[in-house]
Image: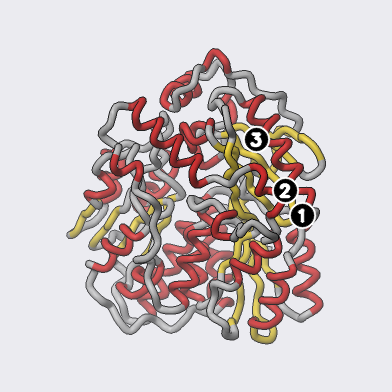
Amino acid sequence: MSGGGLTCERVVSTGSLARLLVAATARALRNTDCADLGQPATLARISAAPEAVRRTAVARAAGRSALKPAHLAEVDTDQVARWLTDQYPRRRYPGVLLGSPHGAAMHLAVALGVPWLPTAFEVNVQWPGGEVDRPHHALSHGSALSARLLGGNADVHVRQVHCPASRGTAAGQTVSLTVRWRHLPGAYRRFLTDHLEPKAAVVLLADGRTWPVVDVGPEHTFQIGCPPSGLDPVDFHPDSHALRQVLRAAGGDDCRWDPPEVTCAQATAEHGVESGFEGSARQWAARRDHPLHQVFVPRPEALSATVADLYRRWLREAGKSGNRLVVECGRLVDPWQVLRAGLVPYWCENATRRSVTGVEWWLAGSEPFSSVDVLPEPPGVRSPALAGLPQWLAVAGFGRRRRAMDRTCVRGYPVTAVPTRRATEVLRAQPYDLPTPPPLTVDVALAALRDDGARQGLTVC
C-alpha cells in the first residue's frame, strides 16, 4: 500500500472468512495445520461478565481492529489480490477454485491439491459515534467511506452490510464493506498464468442467495441484514419481533430503527460473484485454453453435503473407512488435520438453526457414521436465529459409537470467542490415518458436483 505503512494484513478484516480460508488452504497445501491461526481472546475472557460490560469490551475490540477512515484512500485492491496469491506454494497446479467463501470449497481445493481464491474481501472501518440502531446513519457514513475506497480502485464494487444480528454491538462501532472485484484482478491473472498446468480447469463457485439492497451510487450498494444471520429480510422490518430481540441484545433501541427504502428486492447477497468477474475469468480462460466451470450454490448446506459425500467416497476408494465425521462451524476449520486423520468434513456456515438443521437432515439421510465430532463455533452474539446447545448435541448423537462436542466451544456459548486453532487442537487428538489418499481429479470432483450436487440444488455449467 502507499505510504503510512498500511499492509494488506491490516486492510482485510481479521474476522473475514475469505481471509481464513485462504490461510487454511495454503497451509494444507504445505502439509501444515492451522495451529498458528487465532484471534484475540477478548470475548473468551469476559463471557461471564455483565451484559453491559461485555458489549463495551466487544465495541472497543472492534474499533481497535478496524481501519481508520483516512486509510481507505491508501487501499490498493490489486495489492490485496497479490497478498492472497502470495500465500500459496509456488508450483504448478492441476486447477484452481475461485469464488464465494465456503468451508466446503476449501476442503474440495485441498482434496484436489489446488488453491482457493476469493472473488471479494471484507474491510471493517471505524465509525466514530456510530449507533447500531441507526441504519440511515450507517448508510451516510458508509457512502463517504466507499467513495474514498472507490476513488483509487475503479475495478471493484462495494457492498456495505449493516447487520446487528450477525455482528452485534460491533455493527454500531464499525462499518463493514465487502469489496467485490468486477473483473479478474491482475494479480490473479499473473498467478494463474504462471502456476496452472496446461489445460488446467478453472472452477468458479458462486453463492446464489439474494437479498434486498439499496443502490447508493456508482458501484456502492447497501444492505440491512444478511443471509448468514439466519434471519430473513422481513425480520429486519421495524415491526419485527426478531429485530427487537436483536437490537436489545446489541444495546440498541428498536424504536429508533428507520431503514432506508429498498431499490432492488432481489440482488445478489454480499458473498455473490460479480457478473463482470465471471465474464472476464471466462475470457481469460478461453484465451489460454483452460476450461471454466461455474457452480451455482443456492444455499451453503448444498455444497457442504455434496463435498462431504464426495470425501466419504474418496476415502473409501483409498481403502479407508470413511465412517468418521467432523462437523465444523464457521472459522473452526483445519483441512490438513481432517485429511491427516481420514475424516469426512461437513461445514456449517455458522451456528444458526438453519445451518444446524441442514446437517441434521443430511445425517438423517446418510449411511450412519461410527463417530461424530462437533465443533460449534460460538458466534459472539445473541440472536433468536441461533441454534441452542441441545440441537448441536442432537447432531453429535448421530454417531453410533463416538459422540463428541468440544467443551471449549460449549463453555460460554453463544457469546464467547474460540480461535481457529481450537479446531487444530481437537483434531490433533484424532488417530492418524496415513497415507493420505491420492489427490482427487478435477473431472471426478465436477462429476460429483454435477450429479450428486443436482439432488442438493447445485447447478454446474
| Badge 1 element | loop
Question: Considering only order in the chain, which callout, 2 or 3, is on the residue closer to the N terminus?
Answer: 2
Looking at the picture, how far across and down is residue 130, in whole percent? Answer: 57, 28
Task: State the residue in front, 58 or 88.
Answer: 58
Question: Considering only order in the chain, which callout, 1 or 3, is on the residue closer to the N terminus?
Answer: 1
Q: Residue at x 45, y 68 (%)?
A: 310
- Name the colour scheme: secondary structure
- Cα–Cα span, label 2 and label 1: 6 Å
| Badge 2 element | helix
Residue 290, located in which quarter of the rendered image?
bottom right
Q: From the image, tell me which residue sits under label 1.
A: 153
The reply to whether discs 3 and 2 touch (Cβ–Cβ < 8 Å) is: no
141 to the left or right of 308: right
Q: From the image, tell me which residue sits under label 3.
A: 223
The reply to whether discs 2 and 1 touch (Cβ–Cβ < 8 Å) is: yes
Q: Which residue is drawn at 58% across and 19% down?
A: 257
Task: State the residue in front, 94 or 124.
Answer: 124
| Badge 3 element | strand
423 to the left or right of 158: left
Q: From the image, tell me which residue sits under label 2.
A: 149
Q: Which residue is drawn at 53% across and 31% down?
A: 172
- Cα–Cα span, label 3 and label 2: 18 Å
Looking at the picture, how far across and down is residue 167, in whole percent? Answer: 49, 37
Residue 383, located in which quarter of the rendered image?
top left
Looking at the picture, how far across and down is residue 73, in whole percent? Answer: 72, 50
Amino acid type at circle 1 is Asn
Point out the frontmost of discs 3 and 2: 2
Q: In this view, does 406 lie above or below 50?
A: below
Q: Is residue 390 above or below residue 423?
A: above
Quarter of the N terminus within the rendering: bottom right
Amino acid type at circle 2 is Leu
